[in-house]
Image: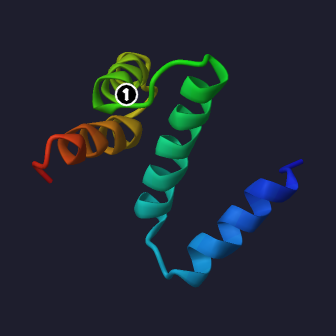
Amino acid sequence: MPDKSSETLSCTLREQHLSDEAAIRYLTVGKIVCELMSAEKPINRKAICCKLLKRLEHAGCQEEERVYYRLIRMLFGRY
């Protein structure tokens, strides 16, 4: 069962008329930032990129890979 914050975020993303892929990108980056904050690690491009690369290694399908590649390109201004 999704928690209240997830439901609120989903509603906000729908109101913004974002595509499913854009919503997935927002959620993915949000989860990564939360993981870094919980681990009391710095939140910077390098840390986010390392997390994305680790997720890319364990991606289960091409859609996941595409999302991670897109986020990595966005980090370096090559989207």
List x then y, in percent, for residue 32.
52, 33
| Colouring method of the image | rainbow
17 w.r.t. 3: above or below: below
Q: Residue at x 35, y 44 (%)?
A: 67
Q: Residue at x 75, y 66 (%)?
A: 8
Q: Residue at x 68, y 63 (%)?
A: 9
For the image shown, how many numbered marks are present on the structure? 1
List x then y, in percent, for residue 72.
25, 37
**Quadrant in the picture for residue 75:** top left
Lateral position of residue 8 relative to residue 71, left or right: right
List x then y, in percent, for residue 14.
59, 77
Q: Residue at x 41, y 38 (%)?
A: 64
Amino acid beneath label 1: Leu
Lateral position of residue 72 relative to residue 25, left or right: left
Image quadrant holding the C terminus, namely bottom left
> Label 1 belongs to which residue?
52
Q: Nearer the viewer, residue 46 or 79?
A: 46
> Secondary structure under badge 1?
helix
**Quadrant in the picture for residue 76:** top left
**Mark 1 packing: few (<14 Cα in 10 Å), some, or many (20+)?**
many
Q: Residue furthest left?
A: 78
